[in-house]
């Protein structure tokens, strides 16, 4: 069988179109961001603020295994963000703080059945001293041996912004010593207790040499993000409905720079909060910001030039933790998200 020159041209054009289509599809699915989800307790209804109900967690797992998402180990995501290697769109990581017993008894069997990787950030004192409701080292070793990623969550789980640099370093090093003795390694990824940090805390974490550190401010981790201020979406009974979970798992980054104040441990309350948007998202009139110290809707924002956003809050934050979250509707009805968490001393 012979082909005419026209037939050969048409066949070659068809092959080229297929290759271009596949290349475009692959590029469309590539991303440099991931949503990181955070839990604490499972089925412990007496701890409403940190607990997720089992029925809620089942819904989350069903959502993550419906074929739309790629759930990867947290350490792999951190490595890819650092090297610039692309991630699949809708990449999600599962993290769990503190190492409560319900992780071992409830969450791990459910995640294992669904073949979903996850990280446990271990607060060492609770394990070491056998605090009620915590796992023990034998159970944590069992998780480690099964491939569960273990993260660093200090020794005492204290409010780090209230401690001196020397106290913070000593606390972290004490935990590291126990990790080495009990697990044979020191975790390279850190989570701030309560999500609280300031410039001084970050300086200690950087000095010790952690590869990355996660807070509890809402948002999406992306390749240009400060590795020691990576965000997570916290899930609890009151904020763990399937609607909010889908919003978090589908979130897109709102890429910003020049955030003020630069220190999350507030010296001025309320803060003069502002940031510069570093990508062209088109019309910014849909940008909305919300503050935990104000009810009744979005706070007023001032747009300066094409990309600078400034917010002046009418009231001070109460002592403890305060939050500002900013969102902008993106493609496919997915929300771009940037959040800040502040610590306010009494």
Image (cartoon, helix red, strand yellow):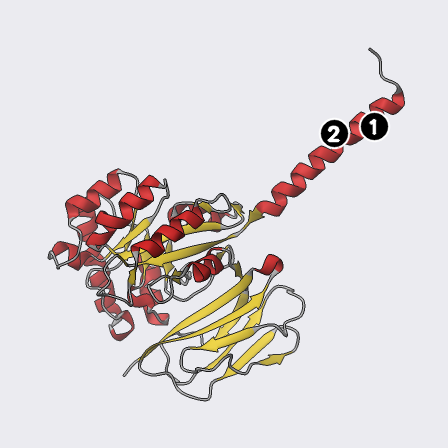
- Note whether residue 191 is visible: yes
Residue situated in front as seen by the camera: 250 or 8: 250
Q: Are marks 2 and 1 in contact (CB under 8 Å)?
A: no
The residue positioned farthest toward the front in the image shown:
55
Left or right of 66 on screen, residue 118: left
Where, quadrant-wise, is the N terminus in this rendering? Answer: top right
Q: Residue at x 80, y 31 (%)?
A: 13
Q: Residue at x 25, y 57 (%)?
A: 43
Left or right of 186 on screen, residue 330: right
Residue situated in front as seen by the camera: 76 or 180: 76
Sequence-first disc among 2 and 1: 1
Residue 15 shows which numbered tag?
Answer: 2
Question: Where does the image place residue 183, in percent across and percent down from the top left?
Answer: 20, 44
Q: Residues within 10 Å of mark 2 (few under 14, many from 20)?
A: few
User: Residues under labels 2 and 1: Cα distance?
Assistant: 9 Å
Question: Where does the image place residue 33, in percent across and percent down from the top left?
Answer: 51, 53
The residue positioned farthest toward the bottom in the image shown:
314
Q: Residues within 10 Å of mark 1 (few under 14, many from 20)?
A: few
299 vs 218: above or below: below
Q: Using the rendered view, name the quadrant where residue 3 is placed.
A: top right
Residue situated in front as seen by the camera: 329 or 46: 46
Question: Where does the image place residue 244, in percent across and percent down from the top left?
Answer: 44, 62
Residue 164 shows which numbered tag?
Answer: none
SS state under label 2: helix
Q: Please give the residue where the numbered disc 1 appears in the rendered image.
A: 10
Exactly how many numbered labels are in the figure?
2
Where, quadrant-wise, is the C terminus in this rendering? Answer: bottom left
Question: Where does the image place residue 65, in percent across and percent down from the top left?
Answer: 43, 44
Q: Residue at x 32, y 49 (%)?
A: 119
Left or right of 204 on screen, residue 278: right
């Amino acid at each position: 069988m012979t082909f005419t020159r026209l037939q050969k041209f048409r066949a070659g054009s068809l092959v080229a179109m297929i290759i271009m289509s596949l290349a475009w599809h692959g590029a469309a699915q590539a991303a440099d961001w991931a949503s990181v989800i955070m839990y604490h307790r499972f089925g412990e209804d007496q701890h409403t603020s940190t607990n997720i109900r089992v029925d809620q967690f089942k819904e989350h797992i069903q959502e993550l295994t419906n074929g739309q998402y790629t759930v990867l180990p947290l350490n792999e995501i951190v490595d890819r963000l650092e090297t610039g290697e692309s991630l699949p769109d809708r990449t999600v990581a599962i993290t769990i703080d503190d190492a409560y017993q319900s992780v071992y008894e409830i969450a791990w069997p459910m995640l294992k059945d669904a073949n979903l990787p996850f990280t446990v950030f271990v607060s060492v004192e609770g394990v070491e001293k056998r605090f009620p409701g915590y796992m023990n080292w034998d159970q944590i070793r069992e998780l480690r041996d099964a491939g569960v990623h273990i993260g660093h969550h200090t020794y005492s789980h204290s409010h780090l912004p209230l401690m001196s640099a020397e106290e913070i370093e000593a606390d972290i090093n004490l935990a590291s010593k126990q990790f080495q003795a009990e697990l044979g390694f020191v975790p390279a990824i850190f989570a701030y207790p309560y999500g609280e940090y300031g410039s001084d805390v970050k300086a200690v974490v950087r000095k010790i040499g952690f590869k990355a550190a996660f807070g509890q401010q809402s948002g999406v981790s992306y390749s240009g993000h400060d590795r020691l201020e990576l965000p997570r979406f916290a899930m609890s009974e009151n904020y763990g409905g399937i609607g909010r979970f889908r919003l978090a798992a589908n979130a897109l980054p709102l890429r910003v720079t020049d955030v003020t104040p630069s220190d999350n441990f507030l010296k001025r309350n309320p803060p003069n909060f502002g940031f510069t948007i570093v990508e062209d998202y088109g019309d910014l009139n849909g940008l909305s910001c919300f503050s935990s110290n104000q009810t009744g809707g979005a706070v007023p924002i001032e747009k300066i030039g094409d990309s600078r956003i400034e917010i002046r809050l009418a009231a001070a934050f109460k002592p403890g933790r305060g939050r500002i979250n900013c969102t902008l509707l993106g493609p496919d009805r997915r929300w771009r998200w940037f959040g800040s968490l502040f610590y306010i001393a009494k």
